[in-house]
Amino acid sequence: MTTPNKTPPGADPKQLERTGTVREIGSQAVWSLSSCKPGFGVDQLRDDNLETYWQSDGSQPHLVNIQFRRKTTVKTLCIYADYKSDESYTPSKISVRVGNNFHNLQEIRQLELVEPSGWIHVPLTDSHKKPIRTFMIQIAVLANHQNGRDTHMRQIKVYTPVEESSIGGFSIC
């Protein structure tokens, strides 16, 4: 079990982007969910609004699948959770898996969340502390607080490192 890097409640991962070291690449992926209530799906999970959320509607584990068209370098996953608003819908145990497709996913992180409030920054690195390269990320909600059945996730962001070019230190886009 690892503990995620927590930011102060409400700290926005866009601060990472402002440093120029990472950029959000979730829009380059195809997102799918194991289940959702109508009007509480991928669009709400990705709309940059902390008041909206994905709500699962099925048996656990609840899955968020993020698939890239080509092998992609991923440095950090940021998940927004709010125990005060969501109570028993709030994830308490999450597994992060990566691989080429659904058939070869391997768990690289398992997180225990204790009444989370704000952004949870999950580094996605290999054993050498280098960002991972993958076609697919799967976030599995294994358990909720208070033994809740369905889950809420308010936002998920995926970040890649920005590489410096050899010409004057400009970023490559």
Image (cartoon, rainbow, N blue to C red):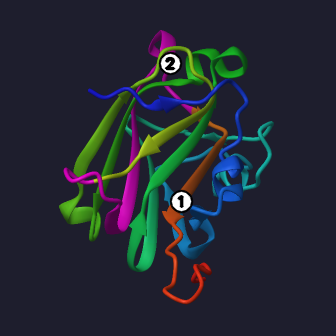
When asked about the image quadrant of residue 81, the answer is top right
Dot 2: few (<14), some (14–19), or many (≥20) neighbours within 10 Å? Answer: some
Is 107 left or right of 140, judged from the image as shown? left
At horizontal 57% and vertical 62% (from top left) the residue drawn is 22
Q: Residue furthest top?
A: 146
When asked about the image quadrant of residue 74, the answer is bottom left
Label 1 secondary element: strand
Label 2 secondary element: loop
Q: Quadrant of the N terminus?
A: top left
Q: Is residue 161 magenta?
A: no
- Residue 13 percent coordinates (x, y): 65, 46
Give the total of numbered labels: 2
| Span colored in magenta | 126-151
In the rendered image, the vertical position of residue 131 relative to residue 91, given as above or below:
below
- Residue 146 percent coordinates (x, y): 49, 10
At horizontal 54% and vertical 57% (from top left) the residue drawn is 158
- Residue 23 percent coordinates (x, y): 61, 65
Q: Name the residue under label 2.
A: 148
Q: Which label sits on residue 159? A: 1
Q: What residue type is labelled 2?
A: Gly
At horizontal 49% and vertical 74% (from top left) the residue drawn is 163
Q: Is residue 135 magenta?
A: yes
